[in-house]
Amino acid sequence: MSAWNAAQSADFRGPLDVTGAATAVVDAQDTVIGWSPAAEELLGYRPHEIVGRPLSVFLPPRPNPSPPLAPDDPAPALGDPFRGNEIRVARHRDGHELLVATAVCHLPGPGLAERVVVATKVKDLRVWESRLALLHGLATQSPVGLAIYDTNLRLTWCNTAYEREIGRPYADFGGMRADELYSEGRFVTRGYPHTLDAVMHHVLDTGEPILDLHFLGRPPSDPEQDHLWSCSYYRLQDADGHVFGVCEDAFDITERLKAQRRLALLVEAGRGIGTTLDVLVTAEKVTEVAVPEFACAVTVDLAAVVLEGEAPPTGGPALTGLVRAAHRSAGQHHPADPPGGARPHSPRPPAAVTYPPGSPQERSLASGGRVRDDTTLVVPLRAGNSTLGLVTFARDPGAAAFDDDEIALADELVARTAVSVDNARRFTRERTAALALQRQLLPQHVPRQSAVDLAYRYLPTDDLSGVGGDWFDVIPLSGTRVGLVVGDVVGHGLQAAATMGRLRTTVRAFAQMDLAPDELLTRLDDLVGQSAEEQGGELGSLGGAFEDVTTGATCLYAVYDPVSRRCVMARAGHLPPAIVHPDGALTFPDLPAGPPLGLGGLPFESMEIELPVGSLLALFTDGLVEARDRDIDHGLQTLGEVLADRDASLEELCDRAVARLLPDGTTADDTALLLVRTRELGTAQVAEWELPAEPVAPGHARELATGQLRDWGLEDLSFSTELVVSELVTNAVRYAAGPLHLRLIRDRTLLCEVADTGHTSPHLRHSREDDEGGRGLFIIAQLVQRWGTRYTRSGKTIWTEQSFPGDRDGDGDG
């Protein structure tokens, strides 16, 4: 018996049933011989008013009767063409007409009764027919599985949907218990029993319905795949309250659950993937999202060039040079090798990987498309026309293969990952370029100086690119002096960094000319004061995109001489330095401010101060001491408290200053800090003499120089030094007025200086064969490592620098 036949066998009384419908019994001449109370109620005739009268009194004949309700079972008509089982117009006792449905039942046998005619209102019949259609639909077409179990929890009826779940007709499993049909399932909703038997007993015993329980199991029709149903149970009882069973309705929500999980996975992917601009972290994120909800293992392989910020070439041969960017597995999926047979060449990530011919990964690389193979799914990571790598999703052997919806989900996950990986790749490329720019713009290694010990910190606001508009510099100058620079360009990021690079390069060039600090800033101000159009014409415009942010930049330039222990400094709108004397006293010298660069209108002034040996000089930008939550005076006070510790090293002081003034490690403005502790070159390293501008001066200078070299143990340099001293003093006697000054300095190299009162710069040139002179500087240039000229208010100084014997680098360590 099918589910529908079982339903049909039940007693579903309708409106044409004789127990409830208007019923008339007629004889062979269609004379009414019996009349029911329902007929009296419907048509208004009392029994004594209608019995004995013809049927046509209340059911007039029709020349064209309507089609029968059941053409396959017509009733014979007597007299008029009445066929029964049809829609007729009946006449009420009060004369009005009403539309009724009629049915006729023939009564064979002896007696006067020939047939029974029943009638009901058509609308009542239509209601009953709709209810019957509903039952038919629930039994045959509804996707909800319906089953009725008796009080012994044995199946007595089910609909077609339930049969499909079992995979057999009802006749094969009717009468079985629920726990026999689903022996391995369980309820996963908390707070209720976990078995079908316990849940149904609870409903039978209490009468309390249980709705929307989630049951997880494998139906007989699909024993390899877990399904999830939303189930409801309610007790069945008749009008007298007699309990005869429990009804179960179950709707398979497996696909809905999968869709919800896919949606949740995409939501999680949106939250996790793309939140970082690190290629490897981005690759790791997709494995975290997909394991174990979507796959048992996920592997991300990227082209090696992607990790370097470059895009793989488009077209041509298949993608090569893959490295393992991320791998994650769960459950029992712990393969010795990653899915597809890829074997890392190195145990340290990111390791290079290759795939054997015929593997899903190799086929995906060759075709450039997605490959599905049993429980493995390989999807290429594509951004634009470039393939960045592969993502491999794998499931345990025996698990269900990836279906079409899951493949679409994998495509979406990989597409999001590809966009994020490409963004991270682009950032890596831009940051690499920015860091390369920073290495060019800022000193990465400051050479050791005899004049000072130093330490520094640089903290740009744009921590992604790592560059900003602040800068510092330490510039070796002639005579063992050192130039100290700190500056601040308006703005942040690459544009400010490019402007900073221009200023730093210009300051270095001016510093090598041995310009005084105020003169250097004056020339720098003149350069900055040029219009943006003029600069664009000279340096190369970017097609109208050039933006000059130089105007308003500030700068502090100081020159310290370790021989005289004098420091000369000037500033252009910049904060003055902090000076901590050996006795611990803190001062901020009242250095003339000067206008920011490019504004013009005011001169720059230098200040000269003496710094005892061991003095601490701090040069910094306002990003260190100024913040939104404190004024600059408080920042300067805090910096002074940090620098007051005389026992701390310069590196420790830098760290403490940053920790105190920038406690969270971030700054609203670029920050540069340069700390120097002064040193001194004493009489043991410096020899100085004053000579008259007379013809005997060269010979006397040679004697003084060779004697000093002998005292220093540098006799090997006597010959070259005699020539240098002789030529420089001879030129000073010939072309300048006295007095002359000769100074030798033993530092990391041997420095020889001759000062006079002249301002004419010597020139290196090639003399002709018949020239009587002009070869002196040419000879000197061949003997020394470097030479040059610097100017002072009283004249000029020509200096040379020679490496010590065996010291090719000239750093004094040889």
Image (tube, rainbow, N blue to C red):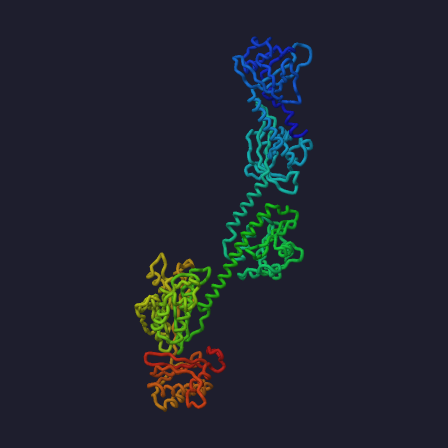
* Position of residue 312 measured from the top left corner of the image (x, y, whole percent): 57, 60
259 up-or-down from 454: above or below:
above
* Position of residue 392 measured from the top left corner of the image (x, y, whole percent): 60, 53
Residue 247 visible (yes or no): yes
Relative placement, left or right, of 628 versus 120 is: left
Residue 263 sits in which quadrant? top right
Which residue is painted at 42% across and 89% down in the image? 771
Residue 649 visible (yes or no): no
16 up-or-down from 608: above or below:
above
* Position of residue 29 measured from the top left corner of the image (x, y, whole percent): 64, 10
Which residue is painted at 41% across and 80% down in the image? 788
122 up-or-down from 785: above or below:
above
Quarter of the picture containing the N terminus is: top right
Foreground pick, 507 / 210: 507
Foreground pick, 532 / 721: 532
Residue 454 sits in which quadrant? bottom left
63 up-or-down from 142: above or below:
above
Residue 484 sits in which quadrant? bottom left
* Position of residue 214 measured from the top left corner of the image (x, y, whole percent): 57, 38
